[in-house]
Image: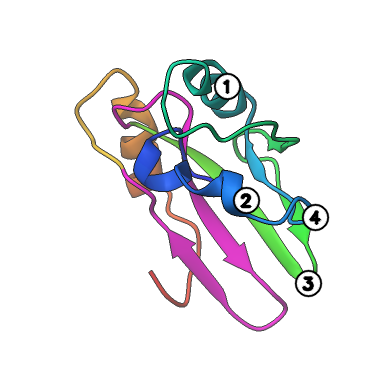
Amino acid sequence: MLSHAHLDHYGLIGRLPKEIPLHMGKATSKLIRFTDEFTPNQIGHINPITFKDREPFRIGSFKITPYSMDHSAFDSYAFLIADARKSIFYSGDFRGHGRKHDNFDNLISNPPKVDVL
């Protein structure tokens, strides 16, 4: 699962075995493919599984809910990761003062129920 298209988050995905699924936002996928044309450390072909804001998906026994976040990278997400017993919230990288500051404000005013942040 990839929260956004900054190299410190995706720079080594080209070294992953091809059978490992890559989950990311649709725009993140496009940004990675575009920037790969101009960077010396080529990632190569990726075949991502894309997700959308607040539309849950499953990876094994885990239910993942992406939350669109305000960040300097376009198409950034935080994730609620839950199984039948516990949940954890991964904030990703975020800010509360940019173009999508309402996403942060909405999350703070209506946070998901979590066991671990």
Residue 7 appears left or right of 42: left
Is 112 located above or below residue 43 in the figure?
A: below
Residue on which disc 3 sits: 61
The residue closer to the viewer here, 115 or 4, is: 4
Which is more foreground, mark 1 or mark 2?
1
Looking at the picture, does residue 54 appear above or below residue 103?
A: below
Q: Please identify, in this view, whether the residue under mark 4 or under mark 1 is nearer the observer.
A: 4
Count all numbered tags in the image, as a single digit.
Answer: 4
In whole angstroms, how far apart are the C-alphas of marks 3 and 4? 19 Å
Secondary structure beneath dot 1 equals: helix
Q: Which mark is residue 15?
A: none
**The one of 112 and 90 positioned closer to us in this rendering:** 90
The mark nearer the N terminus, 3 or 4, is 4
Helix, strand or loop at label 3? It is: loop
Q: Amino acid at mark 3?
A: Ser
Image coordinates of residue 82 in percent, x first then y, are 63, 69
Q: Amino acid at mark 4?
A: Glu
Residues shaded magenta: 71-93
Looking at the rendered image, the disc whose residue lies closer to the viewer, 2 or 3, is: 3
Residue 15 is inside the magenta segment = no
Precedes in sequence: disc 4 or disc 2: 4
Inter-mark Cα distance, 1 to 2? 17 Å
Camera-side mark, 1 or 3 = 1
| Contact (Cβ within 8 Å) of mark 2 with mark 3 | no
> Residue 80: horizontal and vertical position, in percent?
55, 58
Q: Quadrant of the C terminus?
A: bottom left
Kind of residue sitting beneath label 1: Ala
